[in-house]
Image (spheres, rainbow, N blue to C red):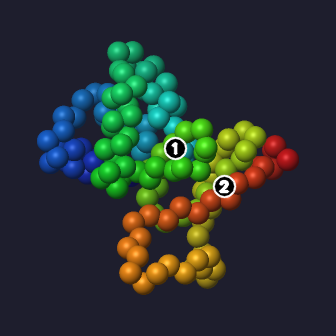
Amino acid sequence: MRDIDKVVRRFRAAGLKITPQRLSIFRLLQDNCSHPSAEEVYKEVLTIHPSISFTTVYKTLQTLRDMGEVQELSIDPERAHYDPEIREHAHTFCRSCRQISDLENTPDAPVLVKLPDNFEVHNVQIHAVGLCEQCR
């Protein structure tokens, strides 16, 4: 998610209000490469808007996901994480410190599976799970 103005226009076009709380969520996610969970977004925005509810944060993240403005990552077995970088790319996940990092895709990456011709793909997530350099 790079263009907050575009997101604001899309929310308004969908009949959704643009509140100071939502704008703070958009700003927090803009160019954010830390792959925050809903809980992490909530804790950060709570410092700016003490009355914000977790439900507001969660529903805003779900709306952003549904609009294609963020990716919801299921790499962590304990919680979903959100990635504002929507281009196709892979991730690493450290089982110890739980850090998620981006991996650059290469054009000559091997195809891992053959999908049936009649299967419509909506999303592909590729990730490597292990221990990062600091945790090894």
Q: Quadrant of residue 63?
A: top left
What residue lies at 30% left-to-right and 52% top-to-bottom? 67
Q: Quadrant of residue 48?
A: top left
**Where is residue 99 shown, x and y percent of the image?**
66, 44
Give the structural element (helix, strand or loop) at label 2. strand
What residue lies at 40% left-to-right and 25% top-to-bottom? 54
Q: Is residue 15 left or right of residue 31?
A: left
**How many marks can you see?**
2
The reply to whether dot 1 and dot 2 touch (C-beta < 8 Å) is no
Which kind of residue does numbered mark 1 sit on?
Answer: His
- Closest to the observer, 37 or 23: 37
Which kind of residue does numbered mark 2 sit on?
Answer: Thr
Label 1, on which residue? 81
- 4 in relation to 110, above or below: above
Give the structural element (helix, strand or loop) at label 1. strand
Residue sitting farthest toward the top: 50
What residue lies at 32% left-to-right and 51% top-to-bottom? 66
- 109 in relation to 130, above or below: below
Looking at marks 1 and 2 on the same chain, the residue that comes earlier in the sequence is marked by 1
Which dot marks residue 92? 2
Mark-to-mark CA distance, 1 and 2: 13 Å
What residue lies at 36% left-to-right and 22% top-to-bottom? 53
